[in-house]
Each structure stands twice: as C-alpha cells, then as structure tokens.
Amino acid sequence: MAENWSSTDGIMRFPSGALVRGRGLRHPLPSGQTPTFGVYLLGKQPPRTEWEARWLPWPDFRLPKDRRLTRIVLEEALTRAGNERVEIACGGGRGRTGTALACMAVLDGVPADQAVAFVRRHYHPRAVETPWQRRFVLRFEEA
C-alpha cells in the first residue's frame, strides 16, 4: 500500500489489506494524517472538506436513498483504500458507518452473513445498529 494511516484509531483492515478509517462527524477530526478521500453518510449535504469527498444521502438510523449509487461509491472507496487514506463517516460513526463498512467487507470477499460480525470485531462492537441495516448488508450482494 502506497499510503497508510499513521494511527490505528478507528482504522479497519479488510481481508485484502485495504485500510479504511471509520469515524463519527460529531467528534473532532482525529490528530495525524487527514484523509485523501472521504465518503459521508448523512441525511443532508456534509460540510466541505480539504480532501476529495462523496456524499451518500443516508438519514440517521435508516438506509441509503439510492442502493445503486451506494454500491458504486463504496466500490470506489474500497478500490482507493488500496493506496489512499480513505474514511467513511456518519454522525456518530456506528450505524451508517458500520453498515457501509460491512457492505465494503462483502465487496472484499467476506460472506454477507458474516460481514456484520466482521465489522463488529474489527471496527466497533456496536457497529450496524438496526435490524434493517443488518438486512441491508445481507442483501448487499444482490444490489
């Protein structure tokens, strides 16, 4: 990997070795390196960043507005995570962020029925907060 995160705070390693930082936007930006690419999962447009970013319209405790766009953006994030500092973030950093990370794990080869457990083990024990978010991950392969 050309660029790695200098800190392990909120960093999840996928089976391919790609690293992605998950975080909550209600918390301060972690010290150290800034992302080179971010995906922001919010019900309204996020604030501008100094780095390249994508916004996925995704209301709190709900599901993304556009499944196809979600898949395209998460595929891009996973590809870029191979050699860039990528972060995925929502308000609190658990529900939507955990769901997106679990979907990325599916894209990276983790079986859909194991992806939530994978993210809870490697990112946050309470990631993916709602039953419909868990179902979204299970059905993500079909999207």
Image (cartoon, rainbow, N blue to C red):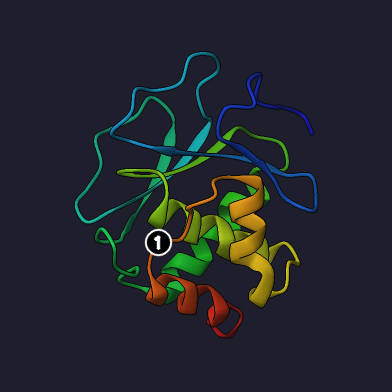
Residue 109 x/y as whole percent: 76, 67
Q: Say above or below: 16 vs 103.
A: above
Q: Place residue 53 in its image quadrant.
A: top left
Q: Is residue 94 left or right of 123 when viewed as pictured?
A: left
- Which residue is located at x 47 percent, y 79 percent? 135
Q: Place residue 19 in its image quadrant.
A: top right
Location of mark 1 (residue): 129
Q: Say above or below: 118 vs 139.
A: above
> Is disc 1 placed on a helix, strand or loop?
loop
Residue 75 x/y as whole percent: 59, 60
- Which residue is located at x 54 percent, y 50 percent? 125
- Which residue is located at x 44 percent, y 51 percent? 97
Residue 17 x/y as whole percent: 79, 44
Q: Quadrant of the N terminus?
A: top right
Q: Nearer the viewer, residue 44 or 103?
A: 103
Query: How many badges with numbers are in the image?
Result: 1
